[in-house]
């Protein structure tokens, strides 16, 4: 089973800042990685799939990079609605484990 | 328009059985995998398992295998998550999500969640 580890577990930022979240896989997973955003009390929302492809309708201030074991999610020019918890998820290799989440707070 | 709608909240006692549902519309139901995700109170997301409605192929995370059953009824475009012996530790929010035409694809449309509370 492949395990996904995110860092940091939480971070503080301000509107207009840029932040980067890292996700590491316990073994090489090519580009088989998704990123999700979850706002409090809501269902998760797909942001990025296959490490760097932006889901339709997601603002371009979100970007993803990486391959094999190390991946990043970057948000530039943070907006108030971006304060949420972000999860990476393994794709195409079962079980499709999630990282533990990174909470972005003000 | 793709929509995924889950059944309402459930309150059960330990040892009871439960089936919650996830109804999808707006696309060819049989051709997309649908998965279930658990979120315990104040915790992160846990992938539980997935089903392909066309032939009911299923995959489970090992820690959920034998603890829950995922099934589908393609005649009514509905997927189910079922327990036969609930425990207090099953208390959580459960989400279903469409998870691609290809097995393991991204979860692009999510249900609103079903809160399951198990308490004596």
Image: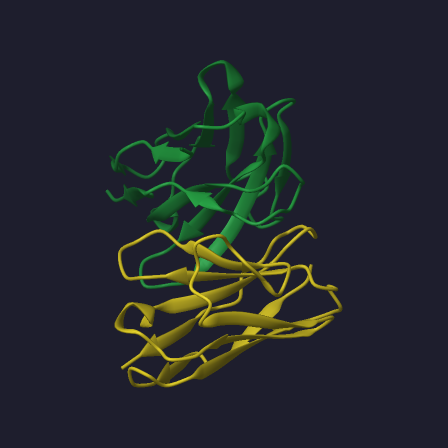
Chain colours: A yellow, B green
Is A79 on the left-hand or right-hand side of B109?
left
Does A60 sit above or below residue B118?
A: below
Residue B67: % across, % down: 52, 40
Q: Residue at x 36, y 76 (%)?
A: A104
Residue B83: % across, % down: 44, 33
Does B11 sit above or below residue A45?
A: above
Does B27 sit above or below residue B119?
A: above
Looking at this rendering, what residue extends furthest in the top direction? B75
> Residue B19's quadrant in the figure?
top left
Does A81 sit above or below residue B107?
A: below
Report the number of numbered marks: 0
The residue lying toward the viewer, choosing from B12 and A22, is A22
For the C terminus of chain A, the image quarter is bottom left
Residue A97: % across, % down: 58, 58
For the N terminus of chain A, the image quarter is bottom right
The residue lying toward the viewer, choosing from B29 and B12, is B29
The residue lying toward the viewer, choosing from B89 and A13, is A13
Q: Residue at x 43, y 50 (%)?
A: B38
The residue lying toward the viewer, choosing from B66 and A81, is A81
Q: Residue at x 45, y 29 (%)?
A: B80
Residue A40: % across, % down: 28, 61
């Amino acid at each position: 089973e492949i395990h996904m580890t995110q860092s940091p577990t939480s971070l503080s930022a301000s509107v207009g800042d840029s932040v980067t979240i890292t996700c590491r896989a316990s073994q090489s997973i090519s580009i088989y990685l998704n990123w999700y955003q979850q706002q409090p009390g809501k269902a998760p929302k797909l942001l990025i799939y296959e490490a760097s492809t932006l889901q339709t309708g997601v603002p371009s201030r979100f970007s993803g990079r990486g391959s094999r074991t190390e991946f990043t999610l970057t948000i530039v020019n943070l907006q108030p609605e971006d304060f949420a918890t972000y999860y990476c998820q393994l794709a195409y290799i079962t079980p499709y484990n999630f990282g533990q989440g990174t909470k972005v707070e003000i | 328009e793709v929509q995924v709608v889950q059944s309402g909240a459930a309150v059960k006692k330990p040892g009871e059985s439960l089936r919650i549902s996830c109804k999808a519309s707006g696309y060819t139901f049989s051709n997309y995998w649908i998965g279930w995700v658990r979120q315990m109170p104040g915790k992160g997301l846990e992938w539980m398992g997935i089903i392909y409605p066309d032939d009911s192929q299923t995959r489970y995370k090992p820690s959920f295998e034998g603890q829950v059953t995922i099934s589908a009824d393609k005649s009514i475009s509905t997927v189910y998550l079922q327990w036969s012996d609930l425990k207090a530790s099953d208390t959580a929010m459960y989400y279903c999500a469409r998870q691609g035409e290809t097995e393991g694809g991204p979860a692009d449309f999510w249900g609103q969640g079903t809160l399951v509370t198990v308490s004596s």
